[in-house]
């Protein structure tokens, strides 16, 4: 099947993109790398009158530090993070996660902003950004606002983005030198979306302790009691404690899925608590 007819714009500035979006009155779709939108267009799951391609916008292609935070432009690709193109993102959780997203051909085109805006519950960036306590920068013609990841994704494929709004960047605070993190997912085969996933970040400098489940029916879910237990004990909790935390957070999942999620948590925390810090 092929996409229904639509108009196409590739603006040269962010303000031009926002103007096209506002003028479309809700009938436009923003495209980054097109790895999610492209299949949806071809299957006619979405039929916009206008597609606005923002993949080349310089304002969305930059990575820069501001104070203790790093601003990652929405049009930065997975492959650029995987390859260490941006020095600020080398050697950390985001580079590790980027290398495990789908296949290299998809990573070459797919963008951070496109993945977050698509809001697939099994997506890697949604989970990693939530575990890091990141914020999303949303732009309109009137200005910008920042929304914590905990409140950005409202459900499967549903976010707080409204008419005329565009996801411009992801803001991530830098981790301290003693920070540890882990990321683990189960996939039926390499490159597919996760059946169960978990991300964990422990940063004494920020007093941050986060263990977050992914691949649920909606947005990622934090396990604060489990994170506090790990921070206190410095050890991986026993399996019954992990399973109890997973059951409380993912009660709608069946027993098999909960077992997978518990195993993902256990292996993720095993990465966090390796003898050598993960930087």
Image: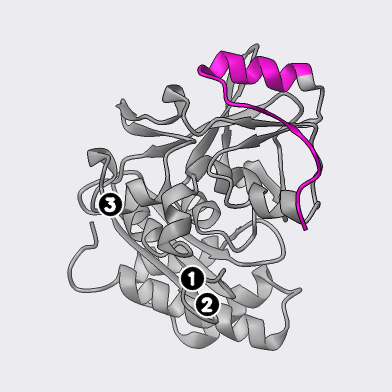
Quarter of the image that includes the N terminus:
bottom right
In the shown orientation, is residue 15 left or right of residue 234?
A: right
Mark toward the viewer: 2 or 3 = 3
Mark toward the viewer: 2 or 1 = 1
Could you say which disc has been placed on residue 83 in the image?
3
Q: Residue furthest top?
A: 142
- SS for tag 1? loop
Q: Residue at x 73, y 48 (%)?
A: 41
- SS for tag 3? loop
In the shown orientation, is residue 254 left or right of residue 84?
A: right
Residue behind mark 2 = 187
CB under 8 Å between discs 2 and 1:
yes
Residue behind mark 1 = 191
Stretch of the chain drawn in magenta: 1-23
* Mark 1 Cα shell of 10 Å, populated few (<14), some (14-19), many (≥20): few
Q: Is residue 213 visible?
A: yes
- Magenta segment includes 244: no
Against 242, is 232 above or below?
Answer: above
CB under 8 Å between discs 3 and 1:
no
Q: Earlier in the sequence, mark 3 or mark 1?
A: 3
Distance, label 2 to label 3, CA atoms, is: 23 Å
Q: Is residue 155 visible?
A: no
Q: Residue at x 59, y 75 (%)?
A: 195
Quarter of the image that includes the C terminus:
bottom left
- Residue 135 place in picture, x, y as percent: 51, 37
Against 26, is 276 above or below?
Answer: below
In the shown orientation, is residue 48 left or right of residue 230?
A: right
In the shown orientation, is residue 221 left or right of residue 227?
A: right
Distance, label 3 to label 1, CA atoms, is: 17 Å
Classify residue 5 by image quadrant.
Answer: top right
- Most foreground residue, 260 or 207: 260
- Residue 174 place in picture, x, y as percent: 31, 40
């Amino acid at each position: 099947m092929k996409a229904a007819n639509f108009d196409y714009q590739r603006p040269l500035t962010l303000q031009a993109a926002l103007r096209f979006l506002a003028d479309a009155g809700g009938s436009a779709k923003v495209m980054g790398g097109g790895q999610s939108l492209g299949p949806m267009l071809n299957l006619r799951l979405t039929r916009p009158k206008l597609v606005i391609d923002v993949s080349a916008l310089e304002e969305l292609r930059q990575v820069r530090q501001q104070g203790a935070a790093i601003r990652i432009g929405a049009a930065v690709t997975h492959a650029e993070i995987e390859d260490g193109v941006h020095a600020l993102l080398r050697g950390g959780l985001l580079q590790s996660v980027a290398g495990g997203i789908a296949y290299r051909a998809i990573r070459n085109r797919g963008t951070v902003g496109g993945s977050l805006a698509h809001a697939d519950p099994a997506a890697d960036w949604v989970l990693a950004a939530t575990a890091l306590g990141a914020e999303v920068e949303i732009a309109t013609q009137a200005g910008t606002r920042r929304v914590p990841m905990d409140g950005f994704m409202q459900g499967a494929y549903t976010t707080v983005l409204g008419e005329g709004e565009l996801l411009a960047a992801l803001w991530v605070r830098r981790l301290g030198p003693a920070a540890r993190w882990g990321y683990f997912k189960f996939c039926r085969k390499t490159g597919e979306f996760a059946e169960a996933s978990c991300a964990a970040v422990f940063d004494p400098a920020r007093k941050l302790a986060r263990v977050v489940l992914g691949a649920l029916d909606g947005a990622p879910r934090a396990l604060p009691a489990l994170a506090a237990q790990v921070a206190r004990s410095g050890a991986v909790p026993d399996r019954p404690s992990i399973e109890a935390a997973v059951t409380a957070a993912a009660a709608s999942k069946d027993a098999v899925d909960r077992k997978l999620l518990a195993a993902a948590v256990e292996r993720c925390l095993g990465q966090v608590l390796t003898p050598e810090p993960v930087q």
